[in-house]
Amino acid sequence: MPALLKGFFDRVLLPGFAFKYRDYPPFWDKLLKGKAARLIVTMYTPPCNFRFVFRRSGHNAMKRTIVGFCGASVKKIWTFSPIRNSKGW
């Protein structure tokens, strides 16, 4: 994922808002439990390559390590690709 997007997540999903660390046990409280996320993803990779070669690595990273870390669930992922040569509206 682009560094700008990762920086956005780091600044928005802060401790105290999205999660809370505890001293014991060494896990965290997921403060966004019960919330749902819908992801809109644009990429240059053809959908077939992204699914079978890369095994949806970007989708899995967002679902498990970003949204899942905070306790929210991903309801739907819309993927638009390839967008490099696409026509405008």
Image (cartoon, rainbow, N blue to C red):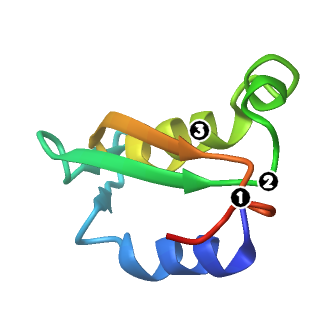
Q: Which residue is mark 3?
A: 59
* Circles 1, 2 touching at the beta carbon (< 8 Å): yes
In the picture, measured across the screen, residue 60 lies left or right of residue 9, that is right
Amino acid type, callout 1 = Ile
In this rendering, the label closer to the viewer, 1 or 2 = 1
Q: Work out which residue is located at the far top of the displayed protein and give it.
A: 52
Q: Which residue occupies 45% across, 83% down? A: 11
Is 23 located above or below residue 35 in the figure? below
Residue density around tag 3, few if under 14, some if 14–19, many if 20 or more, within 10 Å:
some
Q: Nearer the viewer, residue 12 or 14?
A: 12
Amino acid type, callout 2 = Tyr
Earlier residue among tags 1 and 2: 2
Q: Which residue is mark 2?
A: 44
Would you say residue 70 is visible in this rendering? no
Is 50 located above or below residue 23 in the figure? above
In this rendering, the label closer to the viewer, 3 or 1 = 1
In the picture, measured across the screen, residue 47 lies left or right of residue 33, that is right
Q: Which residue occupies 49% across, 71% down? A: 9
* Distance (Cα) linking label 3 and label 1: 17 Å
Is 76 located above or below residue 10 in the figure? above
Q: Which residue is mark 1?
A: 83
In the picture, measured across the screen, residue 38 lies left or right of residue 4, that is left
Q: Position of residue 33 (x, y in %)?
A: 17, 42
Question: What element does badge 2 sit on?
Answer: loop
Q: Which residue occupies 82% across, 44% down? A: 45
Amino acid type, callout 3 = His
Earlier residue among tags 3 and 1: 3
Image quadrant in which the N terminus is located: bottom right
> Which quarter of the picture shows residue 13?
bottom left
Question: What element does badge 3 sit on?
Answer: helix
